Amino acid sequence: MFNFLLPSKIIKARLPFLFFWIYISTQPGCGSWTGNPPKDDPKNLGTVSLAITGSEASTQLLASSIPIISKSGVQIGSMVISQAKVALKGIKFKQVGGEIGEEETFAGPYAVDLLTNTVTPALNSIQLSSGFYKDIQLQLHKLESEEISDVAKTDPLVNNSIYLTGTYSPNNGSSVNITLKVDVSEEVSLMNPDASSPGVEVKDGSELKVIIAFRMDKWFDFTGREYDFSSLNGTSAVLADAGGETGKKLQEIVKENIKKSAKFGEDADGDGTLGKDEDNDSLD
């Protein structure tokens, strides 16, 4: 057996390098994500970009009108929308057979203008684990004045989660200026639980473009409901908690219609709109 003695000064010189090498080797690899680092191998990630829009391009929407359907199911007039805004606390992606994790979230808050198809602040791309995502959940939440610096404190969306204005023109009678105000904190699931579609697929190393589209032509359908716009009197009406019994009932119906009107899917052809063949709700 042979014994080797190393000078102490050589050992002292090498120890700092050893500790530095251990520190570097145990640090996580570089990557790009929102929130906590992904749990699985960074090689098994895909990039997801998201857009939120009205049902049609803004020029088409503003040039046309939205039908108003009575509780008996017939069209009693039309409405031109002048403002349509939604406040979101966040947007969550839910993977098939999995739970929602922080790496699967677009963290808000966001102010969404559905007429201009703009989101403030801008929706940055995020990286998600590869696989099928069956559902997207919107977190509706009242916008506080100090939450988004690019939104003016005087913006009507402040202190609301949904804000809408427009002019209702009945088939018979005078026009009515409509204001809708909603203050709720709710999670809205965009995937119909009975739909057979697997959702959208995130593939390793690829980019997936997803669109959430609010179909505004479904917002004012009062078929089978207790109230409709024929209940309105005067030249203006506020649909809000403080809008009297009629205004509050109409607000609740329109709020539920707005939530149900939101669908999502992959923008496969890259045209910036969600076509029927791209919609992931198979029952729509």
Image: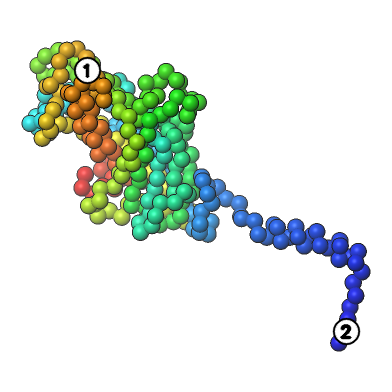
Residue depicted at x 35% and y 30%: 161
Quarter holding residue 250 = top left
Instruction: Give the answer, above or below, for where 33 lies relative to 176.
Output: below
Residue 11 image point, x, y percent: 86, 66
Label 2: few (<14), some or many (≥20) within 10 Å?
Answer: few
Name the residue at the left extreme: 72
Q: Which mark is residue 237?
A: 1
Position of residue 57 relative to residue 237, above or below, is below
Residue 207 image offset from top left, x and y in percent:
45, 48
- Please name the residue that numbered disc 2 is placed on: 2
* Left or right, residue 29 beside residue 1: left
CB of mark 2 within 8 Å of CB of mark 1?
no
Q: Quadrant of residue 260?
A: top left
- The 10 Å Cα crowd at callout 1, few under 14, some 14 to 19, many 20 or more, is some
* 255 relative to 121 in the view: left or right: left
Foreground residue, 81 or 93? 93
Look at the numbered disc 1 and give the secondary structure of its residue: strand
Provide residue 78's location: percent of width, then percent of height. 17, 23
Mark 2 secondary-structure assignment: loop
Number of labels in the image equals 2
Which label's residue is closer to the chain start, 2 or 1?
2
Please tell me which residue is depicted at 76% across the width and 60% down the height of the picture: 19
Q: Is residue 58 left or right of residue 125?
A: left
- Identify the residue at horizontal 61%, vertical 55% (top origin): 29
| Mark identifier at residue 220 | none
Q: Nearer the viewer, residue 67 or 37?
A: 37
**Which amino acid, mark 1?**
Ala
210 left or right of 20 in image = left
Amino acid type of the residue that numbered disc 2 sits on in the rendered structure: Phe
